[in-house]
Amino acid sequence: MSEQVIENNAGQTGAGTQASGAAEPIAALTQEIAQLKEQRDAVILAHYYVPPEVQATADYVGDSFALAKLAVDLPQQTIVLCGVEFMGESAKLLNPNKTVLLPEPAADCPMAHMISKPDIDRVRAEYGDDLAVVCYVNSTAEAKTWSDVCVTSSNAVKICSNLPQRNILFIPDMNLGRYVASQLPDKHVILNKGYCPRHVTISVEQIIDLEEAHPDAVVMAHPECPADVLAEADYIGSTKGMIEHAAASDAQEFIVCTVVGIIRELELRTQGTGKRFHFPATTPRCENMDLVTLPKLAACLRNPAPYEVHVGDSLAPAARLTLERMLEYAAK
Ligand code: 13P
Ligand code: SF4
């Protein structure tokens, strides 16, 4: 493996407030959402990190890649994306003629903003044609336009390994980029200093403490975790990958290094097996995913206009191409 880290000028943004209250009873909201969904020819997609009652209302729950891929094939005219902004944008880019709604338009992923154009231009100038700019899907539509191909945590290694270029500038996540580099010794991966503020709070000391308390547990980690946490992991993969690994494993106990919202699907998929899941003490919550509540889901279906995702014509064609390339390369 060979890797290098670039300095970057990009800032951090993202919502930092807690989810607003659910004054209306869940059963009444769920019923109303089901009726509105029919009336509007809508389908509800949710990420594993949103609150459990929102996942329970969704037609499909998945990781970033599954949600992007699904969005292309669904017959409904309206897609409601229960997740953060880049997920809504990806669904809109892949379905320009459909209505895509985000129940909480302010739910953003801070990492999506941790890259700037001059950082990319500098590396392109240095490496010329033997460079691919690989963009983690957790990125703005604009950052996608600066890139050659998108990836998610479930396909990053595969797609990077199939790229003809030896040099890869991986944006914006340094930890996923470093993990890709560790799996592809023939590539030279140039890293950018972006990170997930949630996953970087997980420390190797916490994992070692958990291993001492649960010596038979399998350690599963999302590749957004720091390198020393990944070094401690028995399995590294996307949210969906971890769920499938836990369901298929003979082990009874798991230490789970990712956002705690994943617990709903882990428990559903391992029901009746007695499998147990332990999270780090600073159990990471994604406060942006937490903003997506049932009352907001109902509100966006009652009155869709303010919740509609729009990607400007100046960005959409180039950003769409990077996502379409991801779908194409992932299918190879
Ligand atoms: P997945 O693609 O594994 O669902 O991860 C998305 C994400 O935002 C992780 O923090
Ligand atoms: Fe972004 Fe991290 Fe939340 Fe995933 S968990 S959406 S990377 S802030």
Image (cartoon, grey):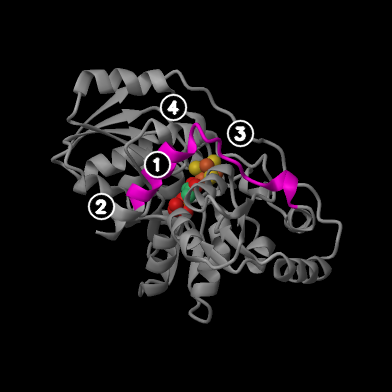
Q: Which mark is residue 158?
A: 2
Amino acid bearing label 3: Gly
Pointer 2 local density, CA inside 10 Å: few below 14, some 14–19, many at least 20: some
Near-viewer residue (282 or 242): 242
The response on whether ligand 2 sits within 8 Å of label 4 is: no
Q: Is residue 224 visible?
A: no
Residues at circles 1 and 2 in contact by the CB criterion of under 8 Å: no
Write the residue at 58% across / 43% down.
85
Amino acid bearing label 4: Ile
Q: Which mark is residue 152?
A: none
**Which stretch is magenta?**
304-326
Dot 4 lies on which element? loop
How many angstroms separate mark 2 from mark 4 (CA)? 23 Å
Q: Residue under circle 4?
A: 115
Near-viewer residue (201 or 32): 32
Name the spot of residue 41 as percent of width and height, x first.
Answer: 66, 67
Whichever of callouts 4 and 1 sits on the residue coming sooner in the sequence is 4
How many angstroms separate mark 4 from mark 1 (CA)? 11 Å
Q: Which mark is residue 136?
A: 1
